[in-house]
Image (cartoon, rainbow, N blue to C red):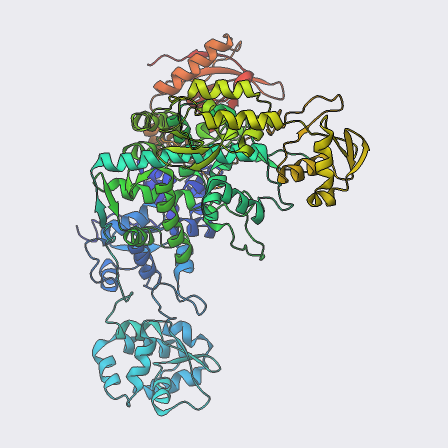
Amino acid sequence: MTTEQRPRPPRTLAEELRSRGDEELTALLRARADLLSPLPGDVSQLATRAGTRASVVRALERLDVFTLQVAEALAVAPQPCPYDTLAALLPGGERELPDALARLRGRALLWGAEHEPRLVRTAQEVLAPTAARPGGTGLGPTVAEACAGISPRRVQELLTGAGLPATGDPVSAVTALTGLFADEERFARLLAAAPPGAREALDRLAWGPPYGEVSARPGPQLRWLLDRGLLLPTQPGTVVLPREVALRLRGGRAHRELRPRPPEVTARATYTPGVADAAGAGAAQGTLGVIEELLTGWAAEPPPVLRTGGVGVRELKRTAVALDVPEPQAAFWAELAYAAGLVAGDGEVDERYAPTPAYDAWAAEPGERRWARLAGVWLTGTRVPGLVGDRDGKGRTLTALGPGLDRGPAAELRRRVLELLAALPEGTAPEPEAVRDRIGWELPRRMTPEARDALCAAVLAEADLLGVTGRGALTSYGRALLAAAPADGGLPADSAPMGSVPPGSASAGLAPSADSVPLYSAPAGTAPAADREAGAARLLAPLLPEELDHFLLQADLTAVAPGPLSREPAQAMALIADIESKGGATVYRFTPGSVRRALDAGWTPDALHGFLAEHSRTPVPQPLTYLVDDVARRHGRLRVGVAAGYLRCEDEALLTQVLADRRAEQLRLRRIAPTVVISGAPPEILLARLRELGLAPAAESAEGAVVTLAATRHRTPPRTAPEPVPDGPPAADDRLLAAAVRAIRAGDRTEERTDEAATAAGARTAARPVPPPPAGALPRTPAAETLATLQAAALSGDLVRIGYVGADGVAAQHILAPVRVEGGFVTAFDHTAEEVRTYPLHRITGTVELPAD
């Protein structure tokens, strides 16, 4: 194609976007979801917003290393940059260069002719090297930029030193000096005459940073460089290597190391898929047990909420000891339960963390469903438990369940790590370093390298701990669960933990009408996450061991549960015995203290004997029967009540024994009757101290009845789980993007109504002619029929006519192409207003289906 035949290149980014097809605009809005908030009125507004600094920085953060290197090379190249010039800056990446340019163009970071692309001005400003930020290229300013602060006389002296004739003005002098450095032969002759040490000084600055320090009286080799403009002063004591000189020294390369291809994720080990699934299932079963144990303990002894929020260090240590896990793992389990909405603050004056009512509903579900819920929350969450113990920007310690643990990129990075595992053959465990390097190549600007590497390591460790992976390899049910994650790492509207998000609670800002709610943007192309969690649960269910309702009692006062106990026997055994070891089988030990704990909770000796006989597959050993009877015989002989505190006992000798015990002196006991002793200590202190003395007191009420200590379980009022905090708006689904593109096109047609070509283009984008709404009475249909009609139209893509009464009482009719119907709202492209709107269903009087023709 000759120059005359070549189509005229676009003169602005808006002009190029206007020439793109609907599919290309849809891809742009999908890749840069922030451009939808609020929806641009036309293509010109879209181009303006795509060029804002915040949006450009966000788009650059989502580029891989090579695409970013291409953008950095464009930032230091002339604009527009000939394709051959750009390819020369990136030797070794010629094969991948067209794809990288297509990615930049698709994200509206690049525009112009194919053979002479232009980088968006804002991207050029962000990526251009400066003194404070040399950037990825390590290049300095151009000769013209560096000479801006130099006097015209000194510029002429530089020409003379370089062997060039003087010029009449500084602009032509700078041009001549730049031409000298750009000419390979003349530049080589100039360097050949350099004194010893001059070339070494240039080489030290060639790959960046390009700035160096010189003394007030530089050596002869530096003076030679300064007199010829090979080094230019920027401020007293500082010099810079001009960009043209650095590129000539580098052989024309923009980067020292070009990385056009992603590093391969190598395998550490390979297992059969069944081995990985079995190992993951074991970890999944352990997850359920530790969460149950954590929340059971917090129901009995709720930890206090710190004044700044979160769980204190001492309470976290206590929890770690109770769970028999390291403190970082205890923080992870607590955060997981918190993210799932199973634990929250109770809101009291003396606020404490306790299980929520949602925990009881969760605990009643089958094990595979419980695990899928936890794993789904982990996959989409933005809280990073590994930060517990670190300090924030103000020097405050970050605590478990406290503020400051959300990191926007966490969900996206977590999902991407698992996607890399899913791309490997089944049963393959990757090298952690290879995963880290691959993530570093794909997301070089999303986080600092240290934070990104730490999060990658945490994702792999947490996935193995949770059972998403087994022995480092992604499990089959982990793959099924991974498909439920939205593309942006955010949380789908229909998968908010233990509570749904109404459409009006989050906004993508898509042109709401004056009396309609903002539009909520759902993830692109995703089915309800609950359905996919159910799919993962179905794959996991056959691998989990069957819950048992029995155990094996042994003569050494232990009981062995050969598998996981069902909930009721497990709760009872946790009360009447102490867990001695956990694993595939759980070993319980009966002690006087554990039996007394059951009696304090209201169990009778007969109930204990009956429970043990009913659930044991072996005969109840005689030592265990004796232990229960002996503890029960002594239990409650002493009664502790409120005076400040008092003891009451029918056995006067036992009271005399307590009074004579020196270990009870601190209780300040005083006998006021043969069977009554009072104390200055409150009842709870009396109970604890007397039990430490080996006695078995019981608390009693003011009426003299024995008080069971486990009469109530701590629960919070109903609570909504905390939502993830992504660092950007959620992605829109395909149908919503199509409606947004139609609205943008409609804005262009409105602006250029008199332009015949624009009118023809607008007609081509319409699926079919849309009749104007007729005058007359509003359509009126029952609410159920209205809902059904709108839902059917949303599925089929048909048009409907609705009657609508606004908040101001004004009635009108609208032609809608429904996109989504949920939560009491319909989101649709309104052909009457030519924009995307959201209408509450209760204000729609009725609907009429429009004929297909």
Q: Nearer the viewer, residue 830 or 457?
A: 457
Residue 836 placement (x, y as % from top left) = 46, 29
Residue 751 visible to an observer of this rendering: no
**562 relative to 788, above or below:** below
Query: Which quadrant would residue 20 be assigned to in this image?
Result: top left
Q: Quadrant of the C terminus?
A: top left
Q: Nearer the viewer, residue 693 or 422?
A: 693
Residue 440 left/right relative to 604: left
Question: Residue furthest toward the left?
Answer: 1
Residue 292 placement (x, y as % from top left) = 47, 32
Residue 709 left/right relative to 275: right
Residue 552 placement (x, y as % from top left) = 38, 26
Q: Nearer the viewer, residue 387 or 157?
A: 387
Residue at the spot x=23%, y=40% of the render?
Answer: 427
Query: Which quadrant would residue 171 be assigned to in this image?
Result: bottom left
Residue 604 left/right relative to 796: right
Query: Which quadrant would residue 254 be assigned to in this image?
Result: bottom left
Residue at the spot x=40%, y=80% of the render?
Answer: 232
Q: Nearer the viewer, residue 438 or 538?
A: 538
Residue at the spot x=51%, y=26% of the render?
Answer: 626
